[in-house]
Amino acid sequence: MSTIHQDTICAVSTAPGTGGVAIIRVSGPDAIQSVHAIYAPMKSGKSLLTQKAYTITFGNIVCGDQLVDEVLVSLFREPHSFTGEDTVEITCHGSVFIQQQILELLIKQGCRSALPGEFTQRAFLNGKMDLSQAEAVADLIASTSAGTHKLALSQMRGGFSNELYKLRTQLLDFASLIELELDFSEEDVEFADRSNLYNLADTIKKVIGGLADSFRVGNAIKNGIPVAIIGETNAGKSTLLNLLLNEEKAIVSDIHGTTRDVIEDTINLNGITFRFIDTAGIRETSDTIESLGIERTYQKMEQATLVLWVIDLTSPDALIETLAHLIEPKLSGKKVILVFNKADLLTPQEVAAKQSLLDKVQAEKITISAKFKNNTDRLQTKLVEAANLPEVGQNDVIVTNIRHYEALTRALEAIQRVISGMDNGISSDFLAQDIRECMHYLGEITGQISNDEILGNIFAKFCIGK
């Protein structure tokens, strides 16, 4: 297999810093020769140049007569490696000094330092994986929960790609027939059966639409569900945030207006990541800084999927009703949980009377005492229920990448034009154009159609050594 790149790259593939061991990866046409030049196997006659693929040898990295480290060397020969190129992985001790010494020796042998994501980029360019699978590698590295791990693993194995390949192949068959019709336009013949094309376009529309719709779930699993904690000043929002996070993240004080900016952190409940946003308390104020914080509160409410509206049960009725007039219009389309706090300071009858003030608000309701941690476990249960995320099976295809979602949306628009065009009897050349456009956007996802700018943007986000 001929490789795309003609140079040899090297990088530390393990996490930065000192550890028990570190792995240095070398890939390219001179990878084996470069390591051979600085490696002395413990057993004589075990030259890397003749070593079989998928084997590991024990030996020393040397600089002339000077020992640098005892290492294990794993060897992979093209095309059967991660990158599709000759690849060598050196497992050395985790000293940062040793790692740098080995890299310097490799660079003296003609290697160069790898760019971020360059090993995975070479795997893509050499046909070892498509672009969506390459992006899944980065997602797998960054996975922080069972849900994100499962989705990244499924995409890396090609579940999403296989769906797109099927759709694109079917469209290609019809596009070819329609293009053939254009060659015989003067003879007024149809090679592409319109009823079959219509059924195919309708099926593809449903599949693409389903994939695009799955982005809501995929994005929530990958990036977490944004939850804004709102309410009046001193209602207990920061206390509640600290309680949910199980750490003193926010300043808690009896002084009104302590929180003047948003504070964000995440927790994982039942495999679902929630991104909590503690916001500035809402009230009338002449303080310029606090007013800016309140404006940001409204902005975060707009961005949130879930809203925890914390109500201080000790507040006067008039204040609760005034805040309701300010807040309620901004809750349209949001899932809301009304959290009635400081229940330990009132009788059950007084609590019920306060709750009745907000009977018109369409929301889940729960009464807690953040100070004494009463009912907070039920609040966590309500959060998971409000998230309403379905169980994701190992073979489910879920879209998690905004780039993929945008391409699917454009492909959906194109296939809808194909259907509308056939309904209106448009000519073959316009049908062909819309079919090609749908294929184009599907191909953008897998990298069948790509440009250097897109590739550079994707792989620049990877860590060095992957």
Image (tube, rainbow, N blue to C red):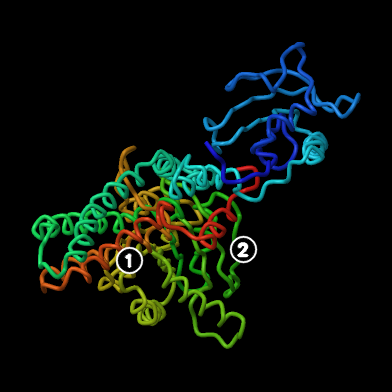
Q: Is residue 224 above or below residue 99?
A: below
Picture coordinates of residue 6, whole percent (x, y): 64, 44
Q: Secondary structure at mark 1?
A: helix
Image position, residue 299 (x, y; %) = 47, 75
Residue at numbered disc 2? 251
| Residue at image location 68% in from the left, 46% down from the top | 114
Amino acid under label 1?
Answer: Arg
| Residue furthest to the top | 44
User: Of helix, strand and loop, which one carries label 2?
Assistant: loop
118 or 180, which lies in front? 180
Q: Nearer the viewer, residue 312 or 324?
A: 324
- Outermost residue on the right side: it is 65
Residue 347 left/right relative to 123: left
Q: Is residue 334 above or below residue 104?
A: below
Distance between the alpha carbons at the discs numbered 2 and 1:
46 Å
In the image, what residue occupies the spot 53% across and 52% down? 245
Is 411 in front, or is 175? 175
Q: 392 or 11, which is in the foreground? A: 11
- Near mark 2 (Cα within 10 A), the count class, few <14, some 14-19 or many ≥20, is few
Asked which quadrant contains residue 35, the reply is top right
Indicate the amino acid at tag 2: Ile
Assign the C terminus to one quadrant of the image: top right
* Residue 465 place in picture, x, y as percent: 64, 43
Compared with 162, 24 (above or below) is above
- Residue that label 1 marks: 410
Q: Is residue 195 rendered to the left or right of residue 14?
A: left
Question: In which quadrant of the rendered view does residue 54 lie?
Answer: top right
